[in-house]
Image (cartoon, rainbow, N blue to C red):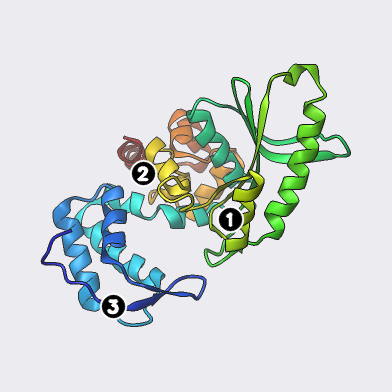
Amino acid sequence: MDNNISKKNILIKKASGDEQLFIPEKLERSLYNAGAKTETVLKIVNDIQDWIYPGASTKEIYRRAFAILHRDTASPAIRYKLKQAIFALGPTGYPFESLIGELFKLKGFVTEVGVVVDGHCITHEMDVIATLDSAQHLMECKYHKDQGKYVSIQVPLYVRSRVDDIIRKRKELEEYRGYSFTGWVVTNTSFSPDSIRYGKCSGLNLLAWDYPAGQGLKNMIEDLKIYPITILESLNPIEQQHLLNQGIVTCSQLSKNMDLLQELDFSKTKYDVLRKEINEICN
């Protein structure tokens, strides 16, 4: 980081209400990840450090940074609003489950979303099942509209028992001979410390917005460039919801199904602006 950028020992407030030290490097890194140029990054970080005060919320910091970034360049600004776009996928959890399915599909897995399967004792609905060769991942997705929420220990305890019941049944079936099975809990927010400890101890994989560090959901989305349609500024919330109801969750899906926009009666100008925005984000 540039030596001209000073640091301030200021506590800011997270969405959960907890306080944390404002770390300029963390803001800088998120801006670079969004594709912002060095000149713009330094401009934003300097502005935030001049403005910031004890007790400022992370949401306030985001809004101020986004406003500057959007004035300077559109595409990185859009990618920077990724976290808010994920929260806009609601109100149900199904679009989030579909997004996770698409992520693993791009990683080479065969995926199923919202499927009912037999366990040894009872049947279960798994949000996502991802299979690659003889490795199968059984995933429970926990979507929250409030970024202050976190997944408590009760969830991984519950998921571990469900996954174990399914694994016990599948190990009895010839079609799964030689398969390995892994349970997952995936969330767009975070996990409690007890959840993380239990996941590590029990062999349950946990995936959250920024967990595991450097390999979280945010990293996966940015690495694979599989952005949700709720990130598109050319679509209003009603138009976004219409497409989500049609099973279109990602920008890449929309780019392959632009004919669905006919029902929305877009003008040629709006259609062209949307197409340009999708190309900029995906590329």
- Position of the C terminus, as image quadrant, is top left
In this picture, residue 55 sits left or right of residue 44: right
* Badge 3 amino acid: Asn
First reached walking from the N terminus: tag 3 or tag 2: 3
Task: Give the answer, above or below, for where 277 lies relative to 258.
Answer: below
First reached walking from the N terminus: tag 1 or tag 2: 1
Q: Quadrant of residue 166?
A: top right
Q: Residues within 10 Å of mark 3 (few under 14, many from 20)?
A: few
Which residue corresponds to mark 2? 270
User: In the image shown, does 76 or 199 lie closer to the viewer?
Assistant: 199
In this picture, residue 77 sits left or right of residue 104: left
First reached walking from the N terminus: tag 3 or tag 1: 3
Which residue corresponds to mark 3? 9
In this picture, residue 37 sits left or right of residue 217: left
Task: Estimate the x, y position of residue 117 in percent, counting from the top left.
Answer: 78, 33
Residue that lies at the very extreme toward the left in this rendered image: 4
Task: Estimate the x, y position of residue 55 in percent, counting from the top left.
Answer: 38, 81
Which residue corresponds to mark 1? 196
